[in-house]
Every structure is written in structure tokens, then in C-alpha cells.
Image (spheres, coloured by chain):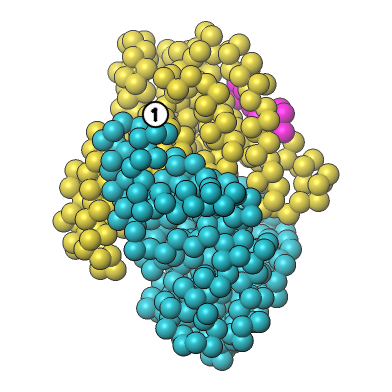
Chain colours: A cyan, B yellow
Amino acid sequence: MPNMCYLVGTAGSGKTILTSSLQTYLITKGASLTTVNLDPAVKHIPYQADVDIRDYIDYDQLIDEHNLGPNGAMIAAVDLVADHINDLRDDIEELGESSSLVLVDTPGQMELFAYRRSGTEITSSFPLDTSFIAFLFDSTLVSHIGGFLSVSLLATSVQLRLNLPIAHVITKIDLLKPHQVEDVLAWRENPYDAIEEDLIGMTREFSLQVGQIIEGLGQIPLIPVSALSGEGLELLSAQISRVFEAGEDWSI
Amino acid sequence: MPNMCYLVGTAGSGKTILTSSLQTYLITKGASLTTVNLDPAVKHIPYQADVDIRDYIDYDQLIDEHNLGPNGAMIAAVDLVADHINDLRDDIEELGESSSLVLVDTPGQMELFAYRRSGTEITSSFPLDTSFIAFLFDSTLVSHIGGFLSVSLLATSVQLRLNLPIAHVITKIDLLKPHQVEDVLAWRENPYDAIEEDLIGMTREFSLQVGQIIEGLGQIPLIPVSALSGEGLELLSAQISRVFEAGEDWSI
């Protein structure tokens, strides 16, 4: 089975645009890549999807036939992804055999994938030792300590739910000033000072517990990227390469 | 300002149906209640909304006018909620003055509310010392230890993000056997035995860290309810009453 890299993150965190930039970057570097779209409700994707769940699930038809509102239709569409695991496996195996990496863009609304059945059913249907999550930290959320702690816990929650190795990726760093990116990287090493300064609403006990969890994440890579400028794609690519020990063909 | 209770939880966890059952229960108990719908994309709600965000945001018009796909439209609609804080405040203050409680049903897709701007902008615009989150644990997610730990971390992430006191509510317990509910309640006290047994994929270090966080949540109430049978509504109502010290009129 090929190496699978799932891009997961909250709505608007930049999964689809990062899939696109990473695809271009990796292909330029000579990687043989299979790119998968798992979002049945997306209208336009800016990359070439080699495998596309929309070939199996018609979101508009679902709305029309079942008279669903937008919330219900979105839930139903993403839940249906789990019913097409065999189709996806066949498609991915066929293309993935000659690929060093399968890049998987997950549904726009993360919770429908991660906290309902389709996420775990998809990820557990591929070998766990060749699968990996890139969890996207939306830079607009994590540029203050409370948001950073909150998204770190969210990433850990998703890691537990999908039960896969993970890397954390700060996206859209073109929206931050360089010192803000440095702050976020520093909080991963030592969150306590920032917690003391900023989190007035937290009790000391609670903040220490959360700080310990964050410190415990220390060994998980935290990679700042901009899909817009391309900054950080080299590091992210190297990290994926390292996880899969894919050799040097598309690593830095 | 009135006491605010926000029902928050992942898509499908039962926010809307619990809002409905709780409304009926509390009114029967003699509570003076204001019920708020904050989901601009919901089609049908089974309760009487005294304040309704759909009076200010027209989801269908948003799709038509901006030519948005379903993901984009959902994000835009929930983001727009933040632009109507003054309208909501006025409506809630007017009705809430004679209410002992304002029950707030939040958008279907939790991440759009909790991990984008509208959630924090709404909650921070009301006094924090009279606000409270009821975080819904979907029983279909938390009936195994991995799911329970994952949702516990998710709840903690949301608590940090919204920075409010919280109670955890296990919903739809009519879908579980009584011993399963007891298991979940026991895991809150001592998650370690279950972690040792079931979480093969977790390293020992990681599992201990997560266990510590769960143990640290010990003082947060964990209330099993069924909106269908009404089981647990008395306990939940008592908890809300206790948080706000609202007297005995609608507490048990």
C-alpha cells in the first residue's frame, strides 16, 4: 500500500489550498503523487484530483432527492464517504502503486470527518504504519496563546480519534508578522510564561494541566507554511519524507 | 443581563433536540425562559425560538447572491452571525429581562462557531460571570474509551477557546445500554484501566498525559441525558440552576 498523508484541520484552515501548493511543489521535486479529494460538497478545487469522492457522491442530488437542509445534507454527504471505502481503496491502490505518496484533502468541515464515522473508517482501512496526519493550525486562530492551546488540544483530540502519527502545520503564515510565528513556535517549547500573562480567565491549576499537555507535544513537529508564498513547503515535504523514509527523491 | 446557557457540540450530537426537550421541561417546571437559535442554516427547528438569527441572515439568499458552494456558504453564514451581535443583544436583553435563563442553540457545525470568530464574539459580548456552556458528548462517539478521551479533549479545547465555565452532557443515552453509560461515568473518575486495555495504538507516555487531563476534569459535571425519554433533564436543569444560583423555582 502507498504512503498516505491526510490533511486535516478546521473549516477555513487552508486544507484545499495547501493540498494544491504541496501537489505542485512535490511534483516539481520529482515525486510521483496521487492526490485525493474526500470532500463531497466542495464545488471547485484548485488542483488535479486523481481520485475524487464526487465521482461517487452527488451532493446536489442528495439535497434534491432527500429534501435535506444544508446541515443535514452536509452530514449525510460526508457520512456516505464511508460507504465508498472499497471504491476509494481500488482507485487509490491502482494509482498509488506507482506513487511514493498519496495526498488526501479531507472534507471542509473537519468535525464531519473526524467526529463522525467516515474519518475513522477511511483511515483504519489503510495500513496504519504507512499513514500520517498533517493537522493544520489556522494562523488566525493560533496567534494568541488561548487559541494556540485550544487548537493544540483539538489536534490531540483528532490524533486520538484517528489514532495516527501527526505533524502540526501552522498555515497562512503570510497573514502573520515574523515575530508572531516565532511566538507560536516558542509557546510549543514553553507555554507557561504566555499562559501566566494572558489567560486571565483560566484557573492556575487548569492552565498548568494544559501547559503540561502542550509540553508533552514537544516531539511533534510544528511547521509554519504559506501555501501562497511557498514558504515552509520544503520543511513540510521533508517531514513527510522522513515519516515514510521515502528516500531522497522528493525530500530536501 | 440574563443568565446564558450555550448548548455546544459536534454536528449530530443533539443540540437542537436537547434545546427543544429542555425548553419544554423548564417551562413545565415554571421557568421563565428565552430560547435563541443561532444557526442561520437550519431549515426546521422543533422548538419555539424567541430570538432567531434567521431573522437577520438569509442563508438561501447568501448562496444565490454570492454564488457560493455549500462549504463556503455555511462558513459565510455563521461568520455573519458576529455582525449581528447588537441585534441579538437587543433582542435578548428585551426578552431576557423577565427570564431566569436564556437557552442558546448554537450552529449545527460546531467548528464554524467555536473555531472561527462568531463564537468568541458572541460569548464575550455577554457578561462572562452569567454565562455557561453545556458541551454535548455524542453517546455514539464516547461509548469506547478512545472516543471518550478524544471528545473530552475537544470539550476542553472549546472551553479554552470560549473561556467559560462548562458542564459535560452525554446525549442520546437511549442509544446506549445502562452499563455503557456507567462505563463512561467511571472513565471520568479513572481512565487509566480502560486506556491500558483498549488503546493499543497510544504510547504509554501519551496515554498517561491524556489520562491526567481527564482526571483533572474531575470537578466538571458529566450528566447523561436523553432528549427522547427525558431521562437526565432533571439533573441537567439542577446543574444549570446551581451554576446561576437561580433559586428553587425551576431547580429540582
- Occupied quadrant, residue B186: top left
Residue at left offset 52%, top offset 28%: B123
User: What residue sits 67% from the left and 76% below the top?
Assistant: A24
- Viewer-side residue, A136 vs A221: A221
Q: Residue furthest bottom?
A: A98
Name the residue tied to disc 1: A200
Amino acid at the residue labelled 1: Ile
Asked whether the viewer can see residue B8, the reply is yes
Judge whether residue B231 can be spotted in this image.
no
Q: Where's residue A140, x and y in %?
A: 58, 46
Q: Position of residue A54 (x, y in %)?
A: 67, 69
- Crowd class of label 1 (few under 14; some 14 to 19; many from 20; radius 10 Å): few
Residue B219 position (above or below residue B148): above
Residue that lies at the very extreme toward the front in this rendered image? A179
**Quarter location, residue B251:** top left
Q: Nearer the viewer, residue B24 or B81?
A: B81
Q: Is residue A8 above or below residue B7?
A: below
Taking A241 as reference, is B177 above or below it? Answer: above
Chain letter of the residue beneath label 1 in the structure image = A
Q: Residue furthest top?
A: B98
In the displayed structure image, the side of residue A104 where residue B160 appears, left or right? left
Residue A149 part of the magenta-drawn span: no
- Residue A235, how many percent across, how many down? 52, 70
Image position of A48 (left or right of A91): right
Q: Secondary structure at mark 1?
A: loop
Q: Residue at x 52, y 8 (%)?
A: B98
Q: Say which residue appears at 46% left-offset and 85% top-offset.
A: A246
Which residues lie in the magenta part? B49-57
In the rendered image, residue B155, in percent from the top left (x then y), is placed at 39, 43
Q: Is residue B189 left or right of residue A251?
A: left
Give yes or no for residue B54 being in the magenta stretch.
yes
User: Which one is in front, B88 or B213?
Assistant: B213
